[in-house]
Image (cartoon, rainbow, N blue to C red):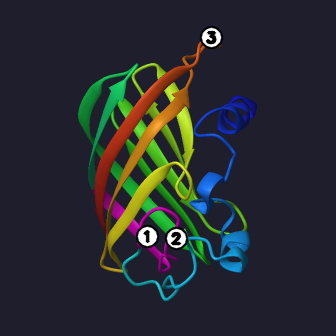
Amino acid sequence: MVVFGAAFGACGGDDSDAGGNGGDQVDDAADGGPDDGGSDDGDSGGSSGDVPTFPDATFNTGTGEMSATGDAEDSFELSGTATTLDGFTSIVFLSDRGSFTITTGGDMDPAMAVSVGTIATTASLTKDCDFEVTKNDTTALEGSFDCGDLQAVAPGTTDIKHINVQGSFSLTP
């Protein structure tokens, strides 16, 4: 768990809020950032800073696809599950060639952990990615992401790699 925490803080995009197009959701609402005018009612979500609240549900069947370019290049299908309870959501997709995990809820910035081959990184869904949810109810959860120029590392090294990841997912109970 310590390794994940260290990688989580060290990877992904930078911590700046240049141009006001990211940042902490609470602060953005006060400063006219991307959350203003967004929907908090659990309907289809938006992108780039507007991550919706997901309804309480368990999704046992999921299919997804992810592709990466840059220092790691690959494209593959994944299988996944998701659980949402009391405003906290965990979406997990895995394959033998990579994975992505999306976590939202509470006071944390919605985030994604990604692995492709032997490199791994994290990304803020509000700062580093275009994240869109197209279906968001207890019968299905569907969406996509596009995260550019993420900093990544390989196990046992300190060499910084750069990757772009795109993907989509569909989940049902």
Above or below 157: residue 171:
below
Label 3 is placed on what type of residue? Gly
Calculate the distance from the C-alpha at mark 1 to the C-alpha at mark 2: 6 Å
Q: Mark 2 belongs to which amino acid?
A: Thr
Magenta stretch holds residue 47: yes
Q: Residues within 10 Å of mark 1 (few under 14, many from 20)?
A: many
> Which mark is nearer the camera, 1 or 3?
3
Q: Quadrant of residue 117?
A: top left
Q: Residue 44 location in percent, x, y?
A: 36, 79
Does 164 appear above or below 65?
above
Q: Main secondary structure of the magenta part?
A: loop
Residue at the spot 46% in from the left edge and 51% down from the top edge: 129
Instruction: Give coordinates of residue 165: x percent, y percent.
Output: 37, 38
For residue 159, which quarter of the picture? Answer: top right
Reading the image, the residue beneath label 1 is: 58
Q: Bounds of the magenta span?
A: 46-62
Q: Secondary structure at mark 2?
A: strand
